């Protein structure tokens, strides 16, 4: 096949739209896709450029068919790593393989079943804070819920509210700083010399000190909680050794960072969609009421909530929390006539792929039924809410269990009042909701 050049978007166009890109880059990228096609190159510096793509086949090729030639980009392995360390999310190569093999058993469905009661307890506490018949921004509720759920799954009752609040503040503040670095690369020099980056690294060091104390308290207590911390402390490499303290803290910090952000986003978008689709909300409420007989066995309850699961899957299609997937190729490569030079940075837009009319009927319509059991394989080539291939998110089952329990608990307690205005978004590192103001009525 003859080589074809990748269409280019100039640095002048990038700089001309910099202010809008900082606020929301999706419209800028969408216009470029319409003008240039499914793949284009955006020049972001004198010598640097990024390849953007919404080609689902290209993404599958990179994540699965030729995944050995691709690594995560500097965004995660360097930029994010300076705030969260070298754990599963930010590491590559042999180090990643060792960590993945070691930690994987802790996230097996059988192990996660032991954490369901802790999840449910955290969910019930946070949802009890919703005031009925008053408009509220539901995102902070779900943000606290997701963070508390991770905290309880990791540390059971061994973490105080003050410690949790501080950890939450630090992880969210560091993320906001990283967004500024990525959206305004021409200002990175200023962030460095002004001390802004170091200020946030110092904050993360404070978080590490808190986590270290939690680990010390657990070890000194001599008790077992059978939570994620115990599983991480029990984990062994092939030679029988355990993780170093630094590595353990890196993995815990990443679990906090990745484990609450995406979940709180997805839950917020789910209830936003349910408020605008009352028939679907009623169907979820009916399913949850029928499944309530299994509430003493939470795993059995989850298996009964099949439609609720489809609601969450469809939510993540329309609003994928991780809305871009990044990769860099080790060696030169080619795909369908396009030449990919060595060390090219690729960003795949899940927001575009998940709404592509070539793959999805009525792509902008909320249709949970499209994810019934018979369609699982039908959409696998262009549905990537947790990634794919060897680097697929290790916490996908944890997240799904948590989100099903949270939506089930919410609709059992409340009816979400109808809302018709468009859903607002704020794309940061993850795709976040904006002004998710809703009103809830207590169910009889």
Image: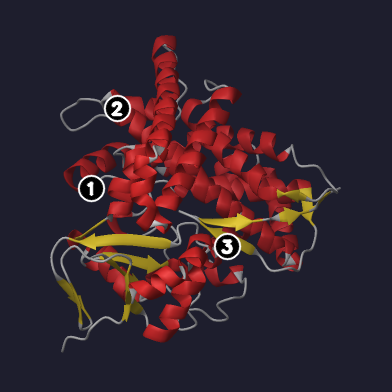
Residue at x 47% of width, y 70% of height: 17
Can residue 134 be seen in the rendering of this structure?
yes
Q: CA distance from mark 3 to mark 2?
A: 36 Å
Query: How far is disc 3 from disc 1 in space, using C-alphas?
Result: 30 Å
Comes first in the chain, label 3 or label 2: 2
Residue matched to label 3:
315
At numbered mark 1, what does the secondary structure look like: helix, strand or loop? loop
Cα distance, mark 1 to mark 2?
A: 17 Å
Q: Point out the image quarter for the N terminus.
A: bottom left
Q: Position of residue 82 (x, y in %)?
A: 32, 40
Mark 1 or mark 2: which comes first in sequence? 1
**Disc 3 + disc 1, Cβ < 8 Å:** no
What residue sits 39% from the left and 21% below the top?
Answer: 212
Tell me residue 24's x, y (percent).
Answer: 52, 64
Residue pointed to by mark 1:
92
Q: Earlier in the sequence, mark 3 or mark 1?
A: 1
Badge 3: few (under 14), some or many (20 or more) residues near its Cα, within 10 Å?
A: many
Residue 65 located left or right of residue 10: left
Residue underneath mark 2? 246
Mark 2, secondary structure of its residue: helix
């Amino acid at each position: 096949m003859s080589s074809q050049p990748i269409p280019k978007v100039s640095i002048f166009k990038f700089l001309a739209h910099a202010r809008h890109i900082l606020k929301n880059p999706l419209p800028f990228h969408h216009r470029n896709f319409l003008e240039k096609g499914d793949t284009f190159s955006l020049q972001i510096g004198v010598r640097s450029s990024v390849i953007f793509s919404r080609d689902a086949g290209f993404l599958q090729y990179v994540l699965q068919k030729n995944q050995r030639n691709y690594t995560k980009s500097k965004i995660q392995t360097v930029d994010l790593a300076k705030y969260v360390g070298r754990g599963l999310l930010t590491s590559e190569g042999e180090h990643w393989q060792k960590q993945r093999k070691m930690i994987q058993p802790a996230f097996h469905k059988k192990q996660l079943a032991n954490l369901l009661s802790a999840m449910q307890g955290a969910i019930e506490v946070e949802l009890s804070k919703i005031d009925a018949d008053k408009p509220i921004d539901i995102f902070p509720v779900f943000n606290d819920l997701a963070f508390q759920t991770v905290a309880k799954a990791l540390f059971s009752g061994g973490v105080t509210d003050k410690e949790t609040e501080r950890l939450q503040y630090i992880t969210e503040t560091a993320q906001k700083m990283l967004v500024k670095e990525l959206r305004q690369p021409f200002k990175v020099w200023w962030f460095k010399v002004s001390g802004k980056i170091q200020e946030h690294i110092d904050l993360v060091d404070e978080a590490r000190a808190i986590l270290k104390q939690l680990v010390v308290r657990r070890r000194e207590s001599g008790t077992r909680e059978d939570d994620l911390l115990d599983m991480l402390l029990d984990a062994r490499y092939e030679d029988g050794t355990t993780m170093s303290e630094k590595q353990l803290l890196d993995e815990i910090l990443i679990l906090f960072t990745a484990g609450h952000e995406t979940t709180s986003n997805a839950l917020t978008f789910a209830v936003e969609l349910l408020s605008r689709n009352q028939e679907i909300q009623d169907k979820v409420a009916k399913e949850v009421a029928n499944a309530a007989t299994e509430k003493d066995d939470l795993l059995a309850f989850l298996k009964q909530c099949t439609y609720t699961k489809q609601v969450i899957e469809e939510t993540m299609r329309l609003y994928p929390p991780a809305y871009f997937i990044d990769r860099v190729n080790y060696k030169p490569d080619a795909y369908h006539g396009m030449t990919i030079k060595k060390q090219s940075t690729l960003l795949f837009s899940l927001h575009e792929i998940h709404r592509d009319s070539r793959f999805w009927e009525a792509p902008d319509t909320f249709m949970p039924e499209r994810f019934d059991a018979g369609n699982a394989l039908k959409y696998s080539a262009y549905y990537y809410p947790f990634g794919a291939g060897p680097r697929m998110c290790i916490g996908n089952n944890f997240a799904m269990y948590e989100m099903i329990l949270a939506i089930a608990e919410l609709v059992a307690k409340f009816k979400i009042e109808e809302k018709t205005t468009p859903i607002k978004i704020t794309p940061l590192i993850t795709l976040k909701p904006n002004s998710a103001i809703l009103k809830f009525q207590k169910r009889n």
